[in-house]
């Protein structure tokens, strides 16, 4: 069922269970404390009455309290040591009943009133001899009061139905039981339990309602995320997640996903543009091949014309091969396959070899090559670094003026290794600088396909430098030339054995 798979309802279920456990524990504890307080109060009353009965059983009944006017006062002239003797003479002599030795025991009148129905409270008592014979009981005692079994504790309280009874065994073996009907207390305890239950139910409902509201607001970004993801999956890459509270965990997640969706959209746009550009670049040489073959096959031609057609097809095929190789190189860098193991190498020697390779092209374009190559060691892939130098120098030669110059420098700085290629050619327009490392981008669209260039050289250069954890920057002044600066990380220090 969807109900059991919903995060919101699972949170609500756990929240409800926690509330039920907390409220149940609190309610049960409060009820037990209230009941314990009631029974403790009843037990105190029972203990006082047990003491009265025990005094009567020992032949020392409690005396009723006297009003203040009946108490004799000591004469002011009496000495302190004479006062106790004077009080003893003036105290009324009350005959004490003998200790109970038979089968009867009588309470004093004022003590008997403690167990009368008119006194209220429903108290009663019963007393037994050590052999179990009953000595006395109050008129309010139930007829079925059993002789209590003796336990380890000579004094103990017990519940018998709606009766609370306190039992005491005397040192001489007699047993005293004082009890009370606690129906009113039981009823009050039940009413209190119902009140606690009703209050707990109300708090539970309010807690569940508040929890539902809080969880709904807290999980609202998840619904927005699901909705945006569904629209993006349907093809609308412009969708983004609304994040009103970016400081929460879900808000942070939404921002991360928005950034991911932005990069995904840019990747799809680049892929679409890349596919279109690659198709456009391949269409021209394919058209040349088809045109030449159709022309050669249309009728019989001299051998020289066949050779010209084959030469044109060869040039077109070579252009397609260079383009395909460049595309494969970029694909390997995109997938991470081109990240070969780096090794120590000399960047100045790599640059020197690339310059010598391109010197015939510079002579053909009447461009002077100037090199300032200081001995510099680095860590990288020699062939890939050579391709970087070749791409930058060939670009500087191709976009230079007749009689211009290209300067290549290699040096080690305090925090990086620097490779710089600068020229004094036509320069790059400011609006083109942010795009020159994009694939198939050409600052001069009118020169598309000129000199057999595909517009992938700088893109490959940037991919190689990124694989070497370096950076490349360009500065240019239109009409005055351009300068490309590559920064590569310093090689790690040699390990000491």
Image (cartoon, grey):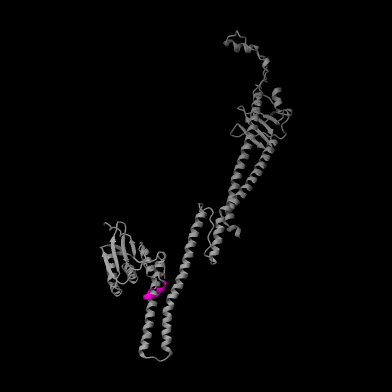
Q: Nearer the viewer, residue 135 or 64?
A: 64
Locate the N terminus by quadrant: bottom right
Q: Would you say 415 lies left or right of 434 here?
A: left
Q: Is residue 130 visible?
A: no
Q: Nearer the viewer, residue 464 or 146?
A: 464
Q: Is residue 107 above or below residue 229?
A: above
Which residue sits furthest bottom?
300
Which residue sits furthest left?
375
Q: Is residue 437 above or below residue 151?
A: below
Q: Position of residue 31 (x, y in %)?
A: 63, 40
Q: Position of residue 320 (x, y in %)?
A: 39, 77
Q: Position of residue 475 (x, y in %)?
A: 36, 63
Locate the C terminus by quadrant: bottom left
Magenta stretch, main secondary structure class:
helix
Q: Quadrant of residue 73?
A: top right
Q: Would you say 102 lies left or right of 4 here?
A: right
Q: Nearer the viewer, residue 9 or 93?
A: 9
- Residue 329 part of the magenta segment: no
Q: Is residue 225 above or below residue 425?
A: above
Residue at 31 percent across and 61 percent down: it is: 418
Q: Quadrant of residue 420?
A: bottom left
Q: Is residue 252 visible?
A: yes
Q: Quadrant of residue 75?
A: top right
Residue at 74 percent across and 28 percent down: it is: 118
Which residue sits furthest front?
479
Q: Which range is magenta?
A: 445-453
Q: Position of residue 169 (x, y in %)?
A: 62, 30
């Amino acid at each position: 069922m969807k109900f059991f798979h919903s995060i919101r309802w699972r949170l609500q279920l756990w929240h409800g269970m926690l509330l039920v456990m907390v409220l149940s524990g609190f309610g049960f504890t409060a009820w037990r404390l209230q009941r314990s307080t009631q029974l403790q109060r009843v037990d105190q009353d029972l203990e006082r009455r047990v003491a009265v009965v025990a005094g009567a059983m020992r032949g020392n009944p409690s005396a009723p309290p006297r009003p203040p006017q009946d108490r004799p006062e000591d004469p002011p002239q009496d000495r302190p040591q004479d006062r106790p003797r004077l009080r003893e003479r003036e105290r009324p002599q009350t005959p004490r009943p003998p200790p109970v030795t038979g089968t009867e025991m009588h309470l004093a009148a004022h003590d008997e009133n403690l167990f009368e129905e008119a006194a209220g409270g429903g108290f009663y008592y019963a007393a037994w001899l050590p052999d179990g014979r009953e000595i006395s009981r109050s008129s309010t005692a139930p007829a079925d009061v059993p002789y209590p079994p003796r336990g380890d504790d000579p004094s103990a309280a017990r519940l018998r139905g709606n009766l609370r009874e306190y039992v005491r065994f005397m040192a001489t073996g007699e047993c005293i039981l004082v009890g009370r009907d606690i129906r009113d207390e039981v009823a009050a305890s039940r009413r209190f339990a119902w009140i606690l239950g009703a209050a707990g139910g109300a708090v539970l409902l309010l807690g569940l309602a508040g929890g539902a509201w809080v969880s709904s607001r807290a999980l609202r970004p998840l619904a927005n995320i699901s909705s945006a993801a569904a629209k993006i999956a349907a093809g609308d890459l412009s969708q983004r997640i609304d994040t009103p509270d970016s400081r929460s965990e879900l808000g942070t997640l939404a921002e991360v996903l928005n950034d991911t969706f932005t990069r995904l959209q840019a990747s799809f746009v680049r892929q679409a543009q890349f596919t279109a550009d690659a198709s456009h670049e391949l269409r021209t040489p394919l058209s040349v091949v088809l045109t030449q073959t159709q022309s050669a096959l249309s009728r019989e031609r001299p051998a020289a014309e066949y050779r010209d057609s084959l030469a044109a097809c060869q040039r077109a095929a070579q252009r397609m091969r260079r383009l395909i190789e460049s595309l494969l190189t970029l694909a390997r860098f995109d997938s991470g396959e081109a990240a070969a193991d780096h090794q120590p190498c000399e960047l100045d020697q790599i640059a020197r070899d690339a310059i010598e390779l391109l010197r015939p092209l510079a002579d053909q374009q009447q461009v002077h090559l100037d090199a300032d190559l200081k001995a510099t060691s680095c860590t990288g892939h020699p062939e890939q670094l050579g391709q970087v130098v070749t791409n930058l120098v060939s670009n500087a030669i191709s976009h230079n003026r007749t009689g211009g110059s290209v300067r290549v420098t290699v040096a080690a700085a305090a925090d990086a290794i620097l490779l710089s290629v600068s020229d004094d050619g036509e320069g790059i327009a400011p609006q083109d600088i942010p795009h020159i490392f994009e694939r198939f981008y050409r600052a001069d669209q009118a020169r598309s396909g000129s000199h057999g260039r595909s517009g992938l050289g700088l893109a490959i250069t940037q991919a190689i430098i990124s694989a070497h954890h370096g950076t490349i920057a360009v500065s240019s002044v239109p009409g005055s030339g351009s300068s490309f600066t590559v920064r590569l990380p310093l090689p790690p220090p040699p390990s000491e054995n």
